Image: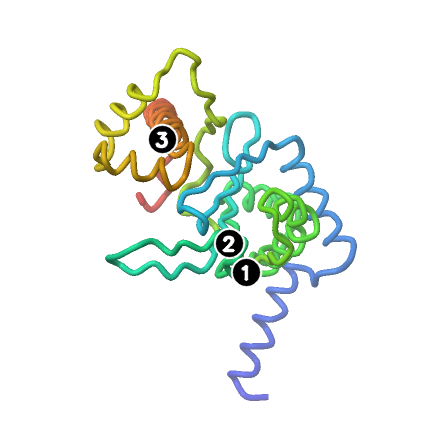
Amino acid sequence: MNIQEHIKKVLREEVNKKFPKPNEKSDKGIYTLLNSYFVSSEIYQNEYWKDYGFSFEFCKNGREIGDLRVELDDRSPDWGPRDPRPQSERSVKNVMLYIYPNMVDMIKKVLPVRENYLMYLIEEWFEDTYMDKIQQMLNRNDLSLDYVTKTNNKKGGLCVPPITKPEDVETQEMMDYIKDNTLFSYRDMERHEEEEPGWIEKTYLAKLRNRERDRINREDRENNPEPIDNDGY
C-alpha cells in the first residue's frame, strides 16, 4: 500500500467514526425530527409572478421555517406583451425548497449525519409529506422537488399572514396607494383591472403585506442581531 492509499484509508476510517453509515433507524430518527420541526406549521401561498411564480411559506410560531418556490415556464419577452397562458397550460420549470441553517444544525446535533445525505433525506421526506398538499393548493399533479438548499440567513424572518381588505377602503384609495408605492400609473391599473378583475385589490393587499413584513423583520433584526462567528464574518 503506497502513502496515498494509506492516507485515504485513514481518512475514510476517521470519517466513518464521526458519521456512522446510514441505516433505517437513523433515517427514521431524522424523519421524526423533521415531523416535529414542521408540525402545526401554517402554509401561506403567494403568487409573485402572474401565472408562473409561486411561493409557499411554511410558518411556525410566527417565523418562517421553510419556503417552497414553484416556477412554471414563461415566454414573455423582455419588452412586449406578457405571456397570456394561464398557469394550467404551463409546464413546470423548477421546484425549489429553501430551508434555514438553524434546522440543519439542530438535526446534526442530535444525530451525526453527513450534510449532503441529510439534504437528500429532507428532499425525500418533503416529497412524501407535503408535495401532495402543495399540488392540491396549486391545482396541479406534476410537481416534484428539484433540490433543497440552505439560505444564507441563519433563521427565517417573521411571518405576516395574508391581509384582508378593510371594509371602508374604496377603490380610489387603493389606486392612490399603488401609484405612490409602485411605477404603475392610473391608466396601467385600469388596464390590468380590465384584463384581470380584482387586480387592484390583490396588488394593494400584497403591497400592504410586504410593507408590514419589511417593518417587523427590520425591527426583529435590530432587536435580535445575528451573532458574529469566531472568524468575524
User: What residue appears at the point 78 percent right and 57 percent down from the top-left corner?
Assistant: 24
Q: Quadrant of residue 81?
A: bottom left
Q: Report which residue position mark 2 lands on.
A: 96
Q: Earlier in the sequence, mark 3 or mark 1?
A: 1
Q: Is residue 55 above or below residue 198?
A: below
Tags 1 and 2 touching, CB below 8 Å: yes
Q: Quadrant of residue 207?
A: top left
What is the spatial separation of the Cα atoms under label 2 and label 3, in whole angstroms? 29 Å
**Residue 231 at x, y percent in the picture:** 33, 46
Q: Is residue 202 visible?
A: yes
What is the spatial separation of the Cα atoms under label 1 and label 2, in whole angstroms? 6 Å
Q: Earlier in the sequence, mark 1 or mark 2?
A: 2
Q: Quadrant of residue 110?
A: top right
Q: Quadrant of the C terminus?
A: top left
Q: Quadrant of the N terminus?
A: bottom right
Residue 146: give its label: 1
Q: Tag count in the figure?
A: 3
Colouring chosen for the image of the structure: rainbow
Q: Earlier in the sequence, mark 2 or mark 3?
A: 2
- Furthest residue in direction front, as rendered: 194
Q: Report which residue position mark 3 lands on.
A: 200
Element assignment for label 3: helix
Residue 60 or residue 227, whichever sits in front? 60
The amino acid beneath tag 2 is: Met
Element assignment for label 1: loop
Residue 73 or residue 61, whichever sits in front? 73
- Furthest residue in direction right, as rendered: 25
**Residue 176 at x, y percent in the picture:** 25, 23
